[in-house]
Image: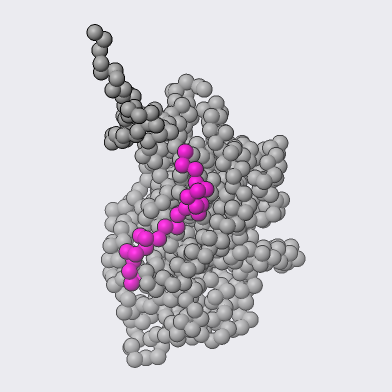
Amino acid sequence: MTDASTSKVRADSLLPPAKASSTPNGAASTSSASNTDLATQHAVDLPSQADAERLGFNIFSHLLDPRLLRSLADLGFGIPTPIQQKSIPLALAGKDILARARTGSGKTLAYALPILQKVLDAKSSIAKSDPSYQLTRALVLVPTRELAEQVFRQLSAVIEYVREDIRLVNVARDAGEKVQRLLLSEKPDVVIATPSKALSYLQNGSLDLKSGMESLAIDEADLILSYGHDSDVKSLLLGGGNYLPSHFQSFLMSATMTSDVTKLKGLLLRNPVILKLNEEDESTSSNLVQFYTKTSEEDKFLLVYVILKLKLIRGKAILFVNELERGYRLKLFLEKFGLRACVLNAELPINSRYSIVEEFNKGRFDYIVATDEPTGLAPGSDEESDDDQEAAEEEETSDVDGEAAEEEGSSKKRKFDKDTGKKASKKSKQNQRKSKTSSGGEYGVSRGVDFLNVSCVINFDLPPTVDSYIHRVGRTARGGASGTALSFVVPSSEVGRSKYLTCPSTYADEKVFKRISRSTSAIGGTFQEWNYDASSVEGFRYRVGDTLKSITKALIREARIKELKTEILTSTKLQSHFEDHPDDLDYLQHDKALLNSRAQQGHLKHVPHYLIPKIINPNSKFNNNTTSTNTSYKGYVPKNKHSNITSRKTSSRKGIVHLKGTKKFDPLRKFSKK
């Protein structure tokens, strides 16, 4: 074991870095020159960063309704982010927008505020008695139902003071087709949906967009085709069913510039303004510290146990795995040691999944084991997608915000799509096969969904693609906050040694990690190797090994069935009840134990004192309140319980009385010799 000072430095290296200097609300500095160029090119006044910091959202007082600004103030939105500073004025000037910005940069409000303002403007000049007053004027497409619910709730909060004028409907909910048809019959102003849901209601006539749609926004555009929505999006956009009007404004919001975004750009946008935050605008490289360590499959569990049990990271954490069975294995493993976590996966009902996210954000539990199966690719298929992404990024970076250059860029992309039609078709079929085999085609947790105040992301299983890695680590270091990402990489020499623990994706870990490292370096990020002291954790190996052997496939299957039954029952019967009684949610625990009391071994929840490394402060409360600051604490559980109450126990020998907790008493000894 190394000396305490050296070990402490290595342990503290897993802690989130000090918060980098940034403006409130995650706004990073944006060069005034870029804003000036955009303003000159498109004849639009764009605010400077200094003015935005001084006035906040009031800088848009000449563009946005005062009631919207009041809602933003109530919600605590102080300073518009760089993407919002550029997008809002350009969108309200009628420009199509293609925005590329990292997760947590405020893309939702960047398209939502212009859409809501346009609805208010359109209805202000129409009498309420006019049939054209109430029409569906905007459609927001998102790839997953979780993100649809999140967007719906955020927009609902923004329209707090204009509810009489704007109606919202989220048709991605599991509310039943009859209920959704009834809501759509009232022609809500803004409809939020996944592509498949939107197309379904367009085909049966419940949703009418052709009469009055003015805006179409596609959130997480780089993912919407890869989630099995390829054919639905094409049917909706290409006009095969004549669903859309001939003229409308479009928004494409994306975290990365992939070939899928290029396809959507060619299909949808007309001379768009491309908003790409400069790398200095994106504070991820300074606020996110990325670690990796090469380890075996069994040592993954050992390191997770040490990290979480000894509190080497502080705050909330998300642990990503590549398979659902591994998610439950990890949950049961942590449960054995008294570490409570929940599994967020596609098998659970949508209401339960969103409830888990909300409880996590409220701090009711600190650890989520998450799967993102639909984003997974077979080992080796990432090279092709990465090449496509690099080609798309090269084309995108060569574009200028000017309309002439944009037209030239769009024509090149359309020609590229035409020349590679066979290749695109092949990839599309592959995506469709993946969506069919997936347990939830519209499930996604590594993208879009806002997990609040996440200190650390642990890639327990390395993601199969660079894009997936970017989206996973994007769950932390959001909105200017700091965060840590730790990735476990299994070397080829260690793959397959423990067959019952091996994940198929680990065979490509080294190749995938090289691509992730290369991509990270290209945007100015760095990876640091976590050099933990192996001798400090070796003492825990026997506990981890024995516990892993006790978690069988049968136990995992029983746990999955038990949780699924409970969640379905809760989701079905109490869905409407919790809307009227939100306080009753406190009685639901998504991180509850899946093991019965006999299967839980109490001694594993305690860390013996002799196993605690010197890097840990002996007075720290890492042991779930089992460790006391009292120096008399010995770090073990006594075999017999001490009691202050003495009980008399009569022996078979008459006249001898035993007092529990005292010495044996013999009445003959009171006589003294004479």
Give percent across and percent down for residue 348. Answer: 52, 63
Q: Position of residue 529 (x, y in %)?
A: 56, 34
Q: Please check the rendered image and state whether residue 474 is part of the magenta-colored stretch, yes or no.
A: no
Q: Nearer the viewer, residue 486 or 174?
A: 174
Q: Is residue 33 above or below residue 492?
A: below
The picture places residue 44, in percent across and down from the top left corner, at: 41, 64
Q: Is residue 583 magenta?
A: yes
* Secondary structure, magenta segment, majority class: loop
> Which quadrant would residue 638 be assigned to in this image?
top left
Q: Is residue 290 in sight in this rendering?
A: no
Is residue 492 at all visible to an observer of this figure? yes
Is residue 604 rendered to the left or right of residue 52?
right
81 or 370: nearer the viewer = 370
Q: Which residues are magenta?
A: 579-603
Compared to residue 221, the image places residue 203 above or below, namely below
Viewed as shown, does residue 487 lie left or right of 508? left
Q: Residue at x 52, y 48 (%)?
A: 599
- Quadrant of the snapshot with the C terminus: top left
What residue lies at 66% left-to-right and 67% top-to-bottom? 436
Q: Is residue 583 left or right of residue 610?
A: left
Q: Position of residue 445 (x, y in %)?
A: 52, 58
Between 3 and 618, the one nearer to me in the picture? 618
Q: Report the residue at 44% width, 23% height from top.
A: 5
Q: Residue at x 33, y 55 (%)?
A: 79
Is 486 or 69 nearer to us in this picture? Answer: 486
Q: Residue furthest right?
A: 422
In which quadrant of the rendered view does residue 549 lie? top right
